[in-house]
Amino acid sequence: FLPRHPGKGQVASEGYRNAQWMEGQLIMVGRFFSFAWVPIGHQVFFGRPSAELTLKMMRAQEEDDMKRDHVEVMRDVVERSWEETYWVERDAAVDELYYGTDGCFE
C-alpha cells in the first residue's frame, strides 16, 4: 500500500504550449514521491537532493548571479542582512522587556 493524495499536475506540449492542469495523484514511495497523471497514464518520480548537492547548486547559482549583476546581488545581501538585524534587535528588546521584570527568570 502506497499513500496517495489526489491533486492536479500541469502538463504541456513540447515548447510549453497548450499548458493545462490535469487530475492526478501524489504518491509517496518510501523517501521518494511520484506524481501520476491519471488520464494520460504518465508518472514522474522525484527524490530529495543531498545537503551537499543543494549547497553546491546554491553556490553555483550565487556565482552565476554575481557574473550577471554585482550591484543587484550586493543589494540582496544587504537587504537580507538588514532584515536579520531587525529581527535580532527586536528579539533582544522583547527579551529585555520580559526578562527584565521582577519575578521573572530564564
Image (tube, rainbow, N blue to C red):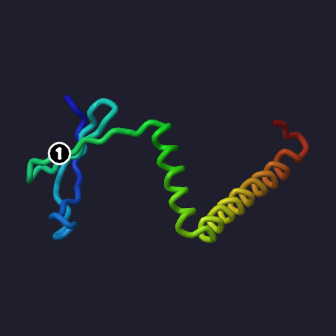
Q: How crowded is mark 1: few (under 14 residues within 10 Å), some or many (20 or more)?
A: some
Above or below: residue 101 compared with residue 72? above
Left or right, 44 with respect to 99, comes to left
Task: Give the percent coordinates (x, y) of residue 43.
Answer: 17, 45
State the residue position of label 1. Answer: 43
Q: Which residue is drawn at 65% across and 65% down?
A: 74
Which quadrant of the rendered structure holds the C terminus?
top right
Q: Who is closer to the viewer here, 71 or 32?
A: 71
Task: Give the percent coordinates (x, y) of residue 32.
Answer: 31, 35
Left or right, 61 with respect to 29, comes to right
Which quadrant of the rendered structure holds the N terminus?
top left
Left or right, 15 with respect to 89, comes to left
Which structural element holds mark 1? strand
Q: Who is closer to the viewer here, 6 or 58?
A: 58
Residue type marked 1: Gln
Number of numbered tags placed on the structure image: 1
Q: Residue at x 18, y 46 (%)?
A: 36
Task: Give the percent coordinates (x, y) of residue 26.
Answer: 25, 45
Q: Residue at x 71, y 63 (%)?
A: 82
Q: Residue at x 51, y 59 (%)?
A: 64
